[in-house]
Amino acid sequence: MSAFVWAAALLLLTGTLLALPLLPAIRELRQNSDAEPLNVIQEHAGEIRYFANRFRAYLEPLEPILRESLISGRKASGVMPDGTEYLVLGSGTEALALPLGEKDELCPVLLASATDLTVSSNSTFSRDVYSRGHFVGGINNQYRALLAEEGLHLGAGSSVMRWVHACGELQAETGCKLFGRVSSDCRIRLAPNCKFLRLNAPRIDFDNSAELPHSFSEVIPASATPERRLHDGDFEIKSGEIFHGDLVVRGDLRIAEGAQVFGSVKSGKVLTVESAALIDGSLISAKELVIGTRCLIRGPIISERELRIQAGTQCGAPDAPTTVSATRISVAPNVVVFGTVWAREQGEAIA
Amino acid sequence: VAMIYVLYIIVGTICVYTVRHYWFTLNRLFGFQRHPYIDIDSADWPPVTVLIAAHNEELVVSHILEALLAAKYPADKMLIVPVNDRSTDRTREIIDDFVQRFPGRIRPFHRTEGKPGKAAALKDAMELVETEVILIFDADYIPGAGIIRQLTAPFFDPEVGGVMGRVVPMNVGANLLTRLLDLERSGGYQVDQQARMNLRLVPQHGGTVAGVRRSALREIGGWNENSLTEDTDLTYRLLLHGWKTVYQNRSECYEEVPETWPVRIRQIMRWAKGHNQAMATYAWELLFGKNRATLRERLDGALLLGVYVMGPITLLGWILALTVFYQGIAQFNGIIALLSLTAYAAIGNLAAFFEIAAAVRLDGHRKRIAILPFLALGFTVSIFSVTHAAVSQISSLWTKAEFHWDKTERFRKATS
């Protein structure tokens, strides 16, 4: 065989090898099977009530049945347009008569009540539960998701896997595990030993924080845009000191007892706020953040790792909602937060 | 023989960028992901001013105004300022119509003269800005309802001077170029920017879908109207003064990418010139000056400044490699050379492709990865374009030719 043929064969082989990876590329280019813009505008990512609102809209076909059950006081059952079985209750205590009293009993249907709803203990609700009035749950129950148009009470040791929303006050007794989004249009009360991920309400009470909250407009003078101070290494704001301005510390930062900061502060390492300190701004830590007892903090509280809030501290105010966020959060009794608490891995109300 | 040492330096430099690509990608796939501010859901939101850079934007300006007016942000705390920079089309008329329809929400800045360029226009528009938080969008972007909050949230951190969101192409399916640009954007944001955020390096301010703190801007001397890429310039001046630029990967905004190669080439040449300009201005000071950047920020910042120089360097490397090969010069013969070459061919060349494939996987779109081999075409065009930009930039030192601003052409169809 001549050299020319060999050269041509080599060229052909090389060309074929080069073209091979282009074949799926050319096919995709012709078919345009994945040429839509990325679906990136996700409303549910930022709206804590997204699932609750969507569930309410999902229940719209049940509206006539809910009305009829309310008038007649009788049960009704059927199938939703997507094939989900439902059970509509006309009387709030009917659920207690359902065969759910046994331990580990499973309720596999969507449960909707036209009025207040009370469910027994030790039950698992594998479909969403809806109450047009108040909802009262027994102890050690497991829920997929819950929506109550008025107040909502979770018995001790209960779990919610996806989300729970109450238009009224939401109360979780000791030992509840709240894995998804927990929200109330009014107030959330968490007893000690509850675990949570994301809480949102105008007011969130850990255990009993009955005393009236401070209002920043009364106790703190409004500050203008403060100057920023940048400090390499560790820094301390001394006890009783009044500090004006934003502060960025690349090392550890300690805000001693009774100190007042009129601005926002950030620490690159550990940020410690001792008792009775007052921060008229945000608290940011790139690592660990510890907030002592009886502190008053106006702005967002962010820790990229651990956050511990000790008893009697107030975060935000009724007229200044805020966000408390960290990878892991532990909150002592008598802490009140106005707004959102968001633990990425685990949040815990400690005793 | 000197040639081969130059070649070694070039190969060494390329290897550094290769390692960087892999480091970023592996971090993004397996490392801890930092999104410290995205959880800020409830807050006493500060007043913000949203600047819209607009120059002859009659095709698109109404879309962004509508999107911003629908934003979930307290209306009394958000002022929209369209910066109409010497437009000769219907941009002014459209903006003024919105001003009439939404009284108190929009305060237009119509600029009829002055230095051309986005930075110069933004600088002049600062006279209307009274808020500490300033957000910036180009007129062809379509922000989602939650993005104003998301871009504002990082400013609760007193160390943050600048914020950058993620840019997502909306005209992906137009042609091969838009599909390639979609992949490049994925790699650049989903992997590169987020990895730099994760690793506390230097996320880059993009000048759109972005924000800046007014006091920080004032401290660093305001907008640099002499810069072709005011965003890169801003990133480095903030860094040198101890301000952080943070990247919010979940603050996404749609943009329109170029649909023709000449427009793309002009765009990347402008970026290259601006970036190189920033490198000449800040590289030395960043690496060796007395400034507030950390060591890792200095190193990453220097590498970031060099990305557009890598085009001509790679091209020079190819030329030198061929020359050295045909002249028969070799310092390391035999198995070492063969292993090095094979290793680089197997791993090094694929670094950028690996990064983009990882980004597409993170985005959850598997089929578009099929287009990946065509990226070689995009890279080749980019290498020659940025080399041309660098050469013309160097030659302008002698010819004293002035840089001029090339506005990126829009492709959106007009709506009634």
Image (cartoon, coloured by chain):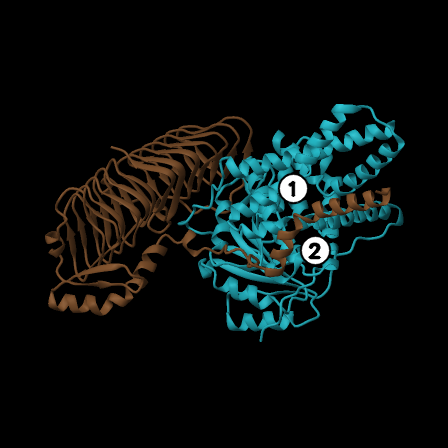
Work out which quarter of the rendered image holds the C terminus of chain A and state it: top left
Q: Is A77 positioned to the left or the right of B174 in the image?
A: left
Looking at this view, is A205 or B339 the one in front?
B339
Q: Is B70 positioned to the left or the right of B126 in the image?
A: left
Q: Is A1 positioned to the left or the right of B230 in the image?
A: right
The residue depicted at 15 percent of the width and 66 percent of the height is A70
* Residue of label 1: B352
Q: Chain of mark 1?
A: B
**Helix, strand or loop at disc 2?**
helix
Dot label at residue B260: none
Chain A, hue in figure: brown
Looking at this view, is A241 or A129 the one in front?
A129
Q: Which chain did the renderer colour cyan?
A: B
Counting from the top left corner in percent of width and height, residue A185 is at 29, 54
Q: Residue type at mark 2?
A: Ala
Counting from the top left corner in percent of width and height, residue A271 is at 44, 31
Counting from the top left corner in percent of width and height, residue A96 is at 11, 52
N-terminal-most mark, 2 or 1: 2
Q: Chain of mark 2?
A: B
